[in-house]
Image (spheres, rainbow, N blue to C red):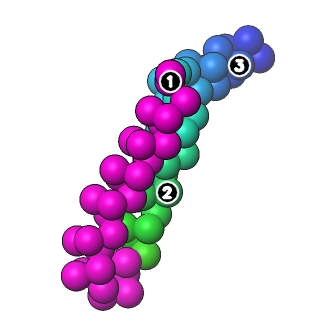
Amino acid sequence: MKYIVGFGKFWYDFIVGDSAVLAIGGAAVLIVGALLARSGAHAAAEVALPALVVGTLALSLRGTE
């Protein structure tokens, strides 16, 4: 059982690390990108994805003062 717990702790620390905002934001950007690509809205994806990445980075930096 301790190997399973250690494995889970490793992946949590590897993915989340110091910023849960970046981990959640990165997953959200990937999901939005997949949904836009599946719907055929490639032009919207070209605009929305960089804006979402910059917004996620801004949110993560806001709390570091």
Q: Secondary structure at mark 2?
A: helix
Q: Which of the 4 image quarters holds residue 24? A: top right
Residue 57 part of the magenta-drawn span: yes
* Kind of residue sitting beneath label 1: Thr
Q: Which of the 4 image quarters holds residue 10? A: top right
The location of residue 12, given as percent across then percent down, is 58, 27
Q: Residues within 10 Å of mark 3 (few under 14, many from 20)?
A: few
Magenta residues span 36-65
* Kind of residue sitting beneath label 2: Ala
Image depth: mark 2 or mark 1 in front = 1
Residues at marks 3 and 2, CA–CA distance in whole angstroms: 26 Å
Residue that mark 2 sits on: 28
First in sequence, mark 2 or 1: give its number: 2
37 is higher (above) or lower (below) than 58: below
Task: Kindly give the residue lying farthest to the right in the view shown.
Answer: 1
Q: Residues within 10 Å of mark 2 (few under 14, many from 20)?
A: some
Residue 43 part of the magenta-drawn span: yes
